[in-house]
Amino acid sequence: MVQQSETIWFDGKLVPWADANVHVLTHALHYGTGVFEGIRAYECSDGTSEVFRLREHMERLVDSAKILGLGMPYSAEELVAAAEEVLVANNLKGAYIRPLVFVGEGAMGVHPGDNPIRVCIAAWFWGAYLGEDALEKGIKVRVSSYNRHHVNVMMTKSKACGNYVNSVLAKMEAVRDGYAEAVMLDTTGHVSEGTGENIFMVRDDVIYTPPASGVLGGLTRDSIITLAGDLGYEVRETPIGRDMLYVADEVFFTGTAAELTPVREIDSRQIGEGKAGPVAKLLQTEFFKIVKGENPDYEQWMHRYEVK
Ligand code: PMP
């Protein structure tokens, strides 16, 4: 269950949580015609608050809408201000923020016609996405029987609602079989991403991740690539076969919700020592320092705000 807040920003104003509703003939409910974001705000060690890479998330949202051909009624700057308004109105020092842009009611054919484009931003407290132990001990995953989207079937660069039916199928299959998450292969059989995360592996101190072209351009992925480079690691964006994962020294997922979650087992093969490896641990520690405002070198990634 979501830990409810008081208000949600909906089409330009704050409305009570319980009143942020839509009609059942909303186009997006039928055809998945919407785009969304997932963003985290953190309470910093000094008691202040910050949203991690807020501007870039809102730019990605605008891009996602453009890819789908949705006329976005707000600019990235306006969405940044709206997200801050929601956090402050709900007194949230740390939160998960969920903006959603979707085609509203009107035409009911597949073509969205000139149905209104509706925009909401909700925020609520959300702890560790893959479980409290996951960040520390790592998770067990399976390679999904479902492929990730072909780039000309769905638009993988758009965080489109409809894309996530594929993620839901893979996630349900994984959980049903006792795994915390799924690794998805693309239609050529190469490793692509998790159902809501990007994936990395480490072998002989070199870090590998699949090329950005067929996966969501994760902002955590981008942050970890930058951070790893700054820490002196070589990072190679290259096609990865599932067998490369099996023999990796370390594997980990990155994402706003999952943060940096180590993988300890894939398809019943232990990865490395079967727990969070040294590279994942170091990157995770440094990542949490950054989001908690303890590393001024990455101040440009923080959007500070104040809750009274
Ligand atoms: N891939 C997919 C499919 C996702 O849903 C997400 C979560 N937004 C990611 C990767 C990671 O992206 P980010 O780090 O920006 O949250």
Image: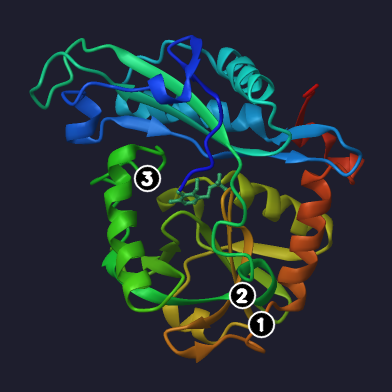
Q: Which residue is mark 3?
A: 156
Q: Disc 2, ligand 1: is the CB inside 8 Å?
A: no
Q: In the figure, is residue 303 to the left or right of 259?
A: right
On screen, residue 165 above or below 89: below
Q: In the figure, is residue 68 to the left or right of 98?
A: left
Q: Is residue 193 visible?
A: yes
Instruction: Tell me what residue is drawn at x 41 percent, y 31 percent.
Output: 64
Q: Which of the two discs, 1 and 3, labels the residue nearer the N terminus?
A: 3
Quadrant housing the C terminus: top right
Q: In the figure, is residue 272 to the left or right of 183?
A: right
Numbered disc in front, either 1 or 3: 1
Which disc number belongs to residue 138?
2
Residue density around tag 2, few if under 14, some if 14–19, many if 20 or more, within 10 Å: many
**Secondary structure under the numbered disc 2 in the rendered image:** loop
Numbered disc in front, either 2 or 3: 2
Q: Which residue is mark 1?
A: 275
Could you say where residue 131 lies in the image, as x and y percent from the top left? 57, 64
Task: Count the numbered circles shown.
Answer: 3
Q: Is residue 186 visible?
A: no
Callout 2–callout 3 Cβ contact below 8 Å: no
Could you say where residue 306 lies in the image, as x and y percent from the top left? 79, 23
Callout 1–callout 2 Cβ contact below 8 Å: yes
Q: Which of the two discs, 1 and 2, labels the residue nearer the N terminus?
A: 2
| Kind of residue at disc 2 | Gly
